[in-house]
Image (tube, rainbow, N blue to C red):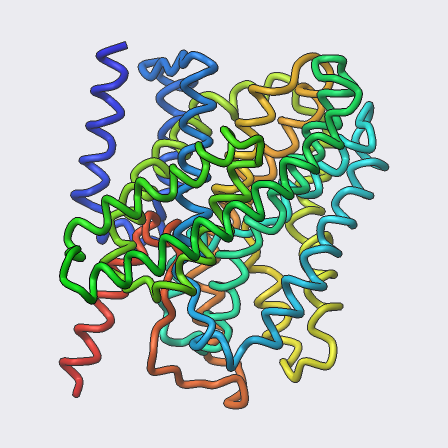
Amino acid sequence: MDGTFSLVLLLLFVWCLCARRMERYALTAPVAFVLTGLLLAEGIGVLHLALPHETVTALAEITLVWVLFTDAARLSFRALRPELGLCVRLLGVGLPLCVALGSLLAAVLLPGVSGWGALYVGAALAPTDAALGATMMVNPDVPARIRRLINVESGLNDGIVTPFVVLALAGVTAAEGTAGPGASGQALVELLIGAAYGVALGLVAGLLLRAALRAGWATEDFAGAGVLALALLGYTSALALGGNGFVAAFLAGLAFGSAHGAPPRVLLYVEQSASLLSVVVWLVFGAVLLPAAFDVLTWQAVLYAVLSLTVVRMVPVALSLIGSGLDIRSVLFVGWFGPRGLASVIFGLLATEELSGPDRRNLVPVVGVTVLLSVLAHGLTSAPLAKRYGRAVPASTGRPPRELPELPVRAMAAGGLHGLRRRARNRRNTH
């Protein structure tokens, strides 16, 4: 076990040394660590991640908590105002349609999947991840308006679908007999408690930190560690109160960012910690979840994965953007760049730990193969399609952009931060 742990640490350090160089070849951290985990575990056999169930669950839960909190806390409603209508369309219309269409397709196409199982698949594979298109997110050829739209959607849709995933897993476990018959109702009560508690905690914490910084009682240098603890506190204390910790963490981040203003330095420590864990999650995905999924993979799961990345994503996006003023190229571009990533992986890991028997064999492989195809397809097409789209996009979408959007934490983990800094230096040099 010590040797395996040392190997993981070595891989992290090696990636640190060459992340910028790899970005030139459109090789993001998710692609690199998924393929590395799969190669070392199955191809060479030198990576043995025989992790206890408790360790996998803890890794998935902590990563999801930090990602939900930071993505919500970094949201600036003032900066979002120009694209507010488009964001409401994508999150309020497109996302529910995506969950519904994905659930319907799962119920029809996947054998032996119950209604709760179909809802789990549809919800778990609905959230997008900007990290898989990090080279697109920092490409100045793509209008800033479109990048902001994709960025905000990616930052919020995982928090929005989390309640549906929680309810679906509770329904599946109740059907399996591993939970009581009232598991779904209990899960709904937990969601409501977690939502109310998360909002209250985030507001109080944000106001207290802002007052402490202004009074000179606190410093931004150590405030990051406090916010890191606050994100986990929202999760653990919500569980202690009988609420859902994930919903509490997401809404606590949203309320905290609104109350405090959340300057970048305060959130940087949490973002870097989440970046580290997210890379480890990708490695675990490639070394543990994918081999297990391949053992029971069916043609129906592969077909569902292809349809999930195309029809299930692009049709709801197109319907939600009717009458928005965006041209057809922009609608197709936004629809295609809806990669499935970290949130879906974590939902898959949680299902692996909570489910057993036929349900796990039917549900987890679908998530695994969909994310794998997305990692490859979106990671490899990010740069060339962004360049082609940027040349063809009309000026009405906001081209040429001068400002770069803030990237969610997963895009930073994929190497997007290097691109931001390099392009900022290039612009200063040209001026």
Where in the figure is residue 153, as x and y percent of width and height?
54, 61
Work out whether residue 39 can be spotted: yes
**Apparent side of residue 388 relative to residue 421 in the rendered image (left or right):** right
360 shown above or below 66: above
Which residue does the image show at 57% across and 56% down from the upper left? 338
Q: How many marks?
A: 0
Q: Position of residue 3 (x, y in %)?
A: 22, 13
Q: Residue placed at 57% from the left, 30% from the top?
A: 242
Looking at this view, is 242 or 383 the one in front? 242
Where is the N terminus found, in terms of image quarters? Answer: top left
Q: Residue at x 36, y 48 (%)?
A: 28
Which residue appears farthest toward the right when viewing the image? 108
Q: Position of residue 256 (x, y in %)?
A: 40, 57
Q: What percent of the width, then of the height, locates residue 30? A: 40, 42
With respect to residue 423, does 366 lie above or below?
above
Q: As rendered, which of 300 and 247 lies closer to the eye?
A: 247
Q: Nearer the viewer, residue 360 or 227?
A: 227
Whether residue 24 is visible here, answered yes or no, is: no
Figure check: 205 above or below 234: below
Q: Residue at x 55, y 39 (%)?
A: 344
| Vertical arrangement, residue 117 with respect to residue 342, above or below | above
Quadrant containing the C terminus is bottom left
320 sits to left or right of 384: right
